[in-house]
Amino acid sequence: MPETDLFKEISSLQTEKRNPLSEQIDISSTTEILKIINNEDRLVPEAVSKVIPEIAEAVNVIVEAIKKGGRLFYFGAGTSGRLGILDAAECPPTFGTDPNLVQGLIAGGKEAVFIAQEGAEDKAEYAVFYFAQRNINPPDVICGIAASGRTPFVKTAIEKAKQIGCKTIFICTVSKEKAIQLGVSPDILISCEVGPEVITGSTRMKSGTAQKLILNMISTATMVKLGKTYGNIMVDLKITNNKLKERAKRILMEITGISYDQSVEYLEKSHGNVKAALVMILGKTDYENAKKILDKSDGFVRIAIEKIQANLL
């Protein structure tokens, strides 16, 4: 029986190659196994550093889209889909965003988050369904995540997005040449080559680590450029539990030098809005004025304070 085209395609992927450094892993000691894994993991950050220009381009596109009212959608299957969901889910508590602003969509639906839905990645119609369900249209941005670069669910999402005029980003761990050969043609291609996995084809390992790092960089840099931090402190967090309530107090105390009791007072006056509280304290103003100036400053605390101080001079 002749080899199928799919067999040839998969066999040619870097993500499916055997790693010569782990060929004896099955007869290695526990410590040796862990060292092999750890040594391979160390290669990932360096691989990610090589695609920073493409990541930066992606961030700038996303920021521009969000300012126009757009949303960011991650499309992925299996590990890639779960990583997209994880990154999206962390944005509201960390940066105070609306849960609809960044969304992770996985082939096979919610069930696939917890239990692998075999074959879901091959069903391109799932991607089309999500576009209708979430009313995806420009200026929304679609970011596909697929280690191999060939996942039908993800490729279909990119193709559909291009058809309706959405900006597209594609994250993979094969070479650009291979991704293009596979028919991937997004606006921005982030090709992070991490080499063969410790366990052949197990892209939840180095490929997954690379994807996690890249997604962290994309969402964090985007939020920084949207004014969600003051310096390196997240100041747009939603106070949804006791831990975050205490963190909010500590943020006010650390940035402004006020006491614990004063931080409680300002959080009450600002209705739990840390950014507004900071502007109230550092700009010596009331809540209503702080909110108004923050709105005029696109949510940037530092700019709002500078505007207040300029008016006082």
Image (spheres, rainbow, N blue to C red):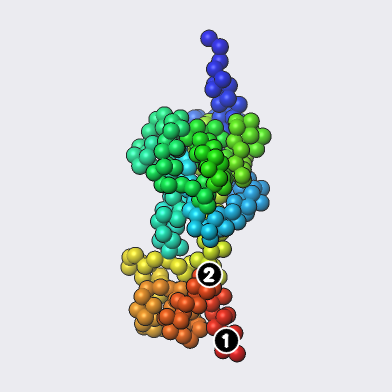
Question: Could you give the CA–CA distance between mark 1 and mark 2, rounded to whole angstroms?
Answer: 18 Å
Compared to residue 11, the image places residue 69 above or below, namely below
Q: Is residue 56 above or below residue 156?
A: below
Along the line of sight, the residue nearer the viewer: 117 or 187: 187
In this rendering, does residue 143 appear at all? Answer: no
Identify the residue position indicated by label 1 in the image: 311
Please rate how many residues cluster around mark 2, counting C-alpha atoms within 10 Å: few if below 14, some from 14 to 19, many from 20.
few
- Quarter of the picture containing the C terminus is bottom right
The local secondary structure at tag 1 comes to: helix
Circle 1: is it few (<14), some (14-19), or many (20+) Cα within 10 Å?
few
Residue at (41% x, 29% y) in the render: 119
- The answer to whether residue 60 of the structure is visible from this angle is yes
Please indicate whether residue 244 sits to the left or right of residue 30 in the image. left
Q: What percent of the width, then of the height, locates residue 49?
A: 64, 50
Task: Indicate the amino acid at tag 1.
Answer: Asn
Residue type, numbered disc 2: Asp
Q: Position of residue 182 (x, y in %)?
A: 60, 31
Q: Residue at x 61, y 38 (%)?
A: 185
Per the rendering, the mark at residue 108 is none
Query: How far from the left and from the top, in percent, is residue 47?
Result: 63, 45
Identify which residue is drawn at 44% across, 61% down.
Answer: 97
Percent x, y of residue 301: 52, 74
Outermost residue, front side:
164
Residue in the image at 32% along x and 68% along y: 242
Residue 298's mark?
A: 2
